[in-house]
Amino acid sequence: MLPRRPRGLRPPFAAWGALLCLVATGAVHGQELPTRPTIAEVESRLAGLPGASLEAAERGAAEAAYKQALESLRLADEWAARAADFVRLTEEAPGKLTAYRAELASPMPPLPDGQDALSATQLEQERAQAAGNLTVARELIEKLRAETSTRSDRQVNLPGNLARLREQVTGLEEGLRGAPPPEAEPARAEFVRAAAQRAALRAEITASEQELASYDARQELLQVRRDRAQRRLAIAEQALDYWQRRVDDQRRLDAERAALEADRLRQAALRSPQLRELAEGNQELATARTEANGWVDRLERAGRDLSEARAQLQELRDNFRALRRRERVAGLDQAMGAILRIRYAETLDPFRLRRAVWTTQGDLAKAEVASIEYGEQREGAGDVDAELGRLEAAGALDPAARAVALELIETRRDLLDAALLDTERLARLLSDLDFTRRELQRANSEFREYMEERILWVRSVQHPLVLQPKGAAALAQWLLSPTRWREALGASANDLLRTPLDLARVLLFVLLFGLAWGFARTTLSAPAQRVTIGLTLRKLLRSAFLGAPPAGLVILAAWLLTRPPAQVQPAVAVGAALQHLAAGLFVGWLLYSLLQKKGVGSDLRWPSSVRDFLRRHLRWFVPLKVLCAATVTGFDQQPTAEWSDSIGRLAFCAGEVVLLAFLYWTLRASSPVVQSLRERSPNGIALRLRPLWYPLAVGLPLLLLGLCLGGYFYTATHLERRLLMSLLAVVVLAVAYGISLRWLLLARRRLAQQQIANLPPPPPAEPAAPPPEAPQAAEPADGDEVEPLPSTEADPQPSVEASQTQGAPEGASDSVEAPAAPRPASVPPTREGEQSTSLERDDALDLALIREQTGRLFRSLAVVALIVALWLIWDDVLPALKRLEQVQLWPTVDWVEAEEQHYPALERTVVPSAEGATPGAPADHAPTQPAPEGDDVRPVPQLTPVPALAPAPSEPDEAAAARVTLVHLGTALIVFAFTLLVARNLPGLLELALFQRLPLDAGARYALITVTRYAVVFFGVTLAFRNVGIGWSSIQWLAAALTFGLAFGLQEIFANFVSGLILLAERPIRVGDVVTVSGINGKVARIRIRATTILQWNGKELVIPNKNFVTGDVVNWTLSDPSTRLDIPLGVAYGSDVPKVKRLLLELTRAHPLSLADPPPAAYFMGFGDSVLSIELRVWIPDPNAIPIIRDDLLNAIQERFAAEDVEIAFPQRDLHVRSGALDVRLVEPERAPKPPGGA
């Protein structure tokens, strides 16, 4: 018995109650299954839920279940419709097969005979329609290809899907049979949802079975449809080619007629001076269309180039699809490797594609500019009467001239219309051509990448290593045949003589080689007047110019040998070998020249023992290795694989043995190379890592030898090429690093000489002690004449802080108008007993620090450049590097399975024009041929999840974008480390490369360096965070929170930060300035972004927040003028000759070398003291840092001179007055104190 229904549900569910009774009855018996509920019934139940007396959770669960049931029922209807489609297609297949076979058996429709008189506009419309038909035909081809691929995948996957679906249906039916009669509304809703889901699954099973049966019945029809589509494509291509020729011919014919008409009118206008200019202009317009490389020629050439580019792009995509389909079926077998090598050799040259894109873009810009110019001219040429009036205003025209003028004006208008139409069409064609060529460039790059990732890991050898006697005889006959070589030389000579321009180019190259040789032997070999970095670069250029002509002549001969299109194969192989031989010997010559006596290596201070050792081994290594490599290259260019697999492999193995011997002898522990490293840096990283790189260097040739002998000959050759490129990169970076150190050494020497030249002479009274002798630099190798390097490791005149005067006499107080300052480096050296300070003078450069920073920066840059170079060389070869992208670090640490790599440019099927229209067709013209009918089958139905039951939608693209892998982390760490490296070592490089050439003081240099350093850190950290997915959108909330926090808790830090920026921008104080802030005197040592460091005269460093310098009172004694006044108070005894004292003081002051003459020194009689006559000496000095030294010098000189001139320096006096008279003296006995009680 069914449970009592709620009162609100009784009226709308009377019919549904009977259905539930049947379901319950079936469930009780356990045999019958519920029938499929209808959509109307479920919608009725769903509409009655709002009035039911249910809890909110129960109502939500029931509503979600009913909605899911509705989706399942709609899905079942879609599957049923799809099954009906497949039944219909199966029934129609025999009739279509017969009709399509009859169409294929019929002859192809003939093209028009060309006798119809069509105008240029009509021809253009026909051509546009043919282009549209061709596009439709190509789309049908791509559609059938996609259908074939989809059908294959479905035929493989459908049996497994059917088994899974049947299991799901069985599980649902068991649950429905064993379920008790539903009582509550949520249970009934869930019961209905299960019944609807069962109906959907059964409908899907039926549709899948019909789909499989339809595929089997229509297998032959699919192939016939593809043949029919290929036939239609051929017809469309022929039609387009025909109408394109008709359009080109008509356009050229119209242009020639217009040119003849313009020439006729020009002849008629010669009699009238007013019409001559107009006639010549018309003639130029007509000629611009018909001349060679005119608008008509450019249109035809652009059309041909566009067709060729599209054909190349389509061929690339076809080859890619074929290779990928074969890889999926058979994998990377040996046959696949042979196909990959053939396709790789047939790929287009990336440089030529890039140059073609640049050329197209340039032609497009010219066409657009010409179209604009013609349009502007056409705007004023439409008013015939106005043009005629302008001619008549210039001079009277007779009736004949008037008629000619009218005809000229109309002809000009027609010529401008034609030229404007030509340039607009050309711009559209070139736009399509530019788009297609860029697409071709991307597709070619992707195709090469696809093959490079697979081609190296397939065996490439099919024949034994040892060549059989029969094969050796055939090789000798093929290579040494006199007939073939006579034919080859004759073909090369005839091909060169047929093209005089190429012959002139060959002669020009020979002349240039001769001039380069002479230039290297004379100008570049001339002795240098002085030692500069240009001398080293000139030696390097001389070596290149001496080696280039012989190598260039050999390469030129090889090019001439391989230039003829139908050249015999022995000549092609020998030419390729000669090119490789010349290039290898040229590189070997450069290496040998670097190591010669007085060569670049000696300038770079490479040890002579190392250079002699390497030069001795290069004599045998370079010829043998280059000869083996050239042999491998030559045999790779001939068509017989047996010879390459034997002789080529033997030559490669010999080359690896030579390379192994060279690396072993040059890198072993007892070699001069390793001994030099041990002497220069016994604990250096190179020696510490020798157990790692030495086995690697020796093991790589052995690995390549094993690969070659194991049959991976192609892989071994490519890996060896990258190994040699790596060695060459190491040599190039070593030379570049040495040249940079050479430049650093010469720059430091020049700065040291400038500093010594700018030092003032020492004072005559106390001559400065000579600076210590500079340490001798390393002995120049091989007679390297280098100027001696001045001592720059320590300042020859260090700055000194003068000690404060202790126990000064009265009247000699420190009353000055500037604070006491440390002694600058521009004054004489400190005397014994004076305290020195670590702070240098303002304009002095710490050359030792600059050398350290710049050297560290150059070393780091060299290491980074080497890492980048090795990565670029080996990245495409080692797939293990790319597997780092599968190590996911965020949002979870996981190993992401590699997905099938996509190649967008190769996987696209249709190449649309740049404007989305058929190239060359009018905008309102569309192809009239309808697209052929295909298989009208509904797509696979998809279940739309109910929001209450479905999980959150996933966005794979965004998830992939937000994923952080090990590659991202490594890149971020490299960027971050490089940023810190540059920010740390940038000051030294800026000093040497830029600031020494600019009129900047120390403060300006410091401000620029600080701002540049902060900018480098900011951009580097931003880039590093961006690599790990932390952009502005991710941290803007953090920035808002920080801004809010700065407004309250961090306002002082923020104020100091902004104040630091103000100090660096406005520069009220600079590094080296003498300042007084908050009663503290000192010298500015550093200005940071938060605080500034003041060096006090007692050597203590005081850190002051930047806010104090902006909001407080600051006295800058050296802001605009470093000169200041020193006041020295003196006192002489009463009775002294005051004018004489003043004269002596002025004489002593003027004699001091640091006393300024303008303003002049002065001495003033200040007044009468208690025991002295007060005199004050005022001296202007160039720098407040000199105050202690000048005061000390002047006081010593004053004491000696006053003693010599009998001028008494006053000392404190006090008068005592004693009064005289009778004294009354009395003796008084003191009273005795009483004894205490009980005392003795």
Image (cartoon, rainbow, N blue to C red):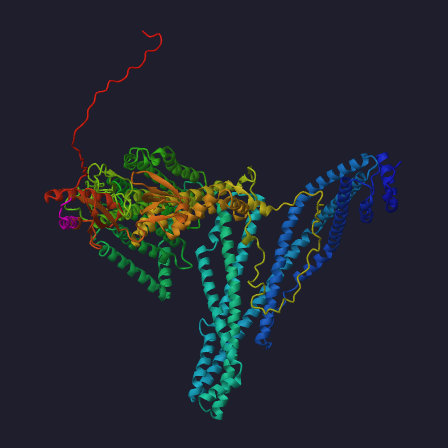
Task: State yes or no: residue 1139 in magenta.
Answer: yes
Q: Position of residue 170 (x, y in %)?
A: 76, 37
Q: Quadrant of residue 519?
A: bottom left
Specify whether 857 is left or right of 206.
Answer: left
User: Which secondary structure dominates the residues rendered in magenta?
Assistant: helix
Q: Is residue 710 visible?
A: yes
**Nearest the camera: 1026 or 586?**
1026
Indicate yes or no whether the magenta region holds residue 1068. Answer: no
Depth check, front residue: 368 or 1155: 1155
Q: Residue at x 49, y 75 (%)?
A: 374
**Foreground residue, 1148 or 541?**
1148
Image: 1048 above or below 290? above
Q: Residue at 53% of width from left, 60% of height from top?
A: 310
Residue lying furthest bottom: 398
Quadrant including the N terminus = top right
Along the horizontal axis of the image, is 288 left or right of 908? left
Residue 883 seen in render: no
Where residue 1167 appears, as percent x and y from the top left, is: 21, 48
Quadrant in which the C terminus appears: top left
Give the vertical position of 1237 relative to 567 (above or below): above
Q: What is the magenta range?
A: 1134-1148
How many numbered dots are placed on residues in this image? 0
Q: Position of residue 981 (x, y in %)?
A: 39, 43
From the viewer's perspective, is 44 left or right of 1145? Answer: right
Up-down relation of residue 954 to residue 690 (above or below): below
Q: Position of residue 1136 (x, y in %)?
A: 13, 46
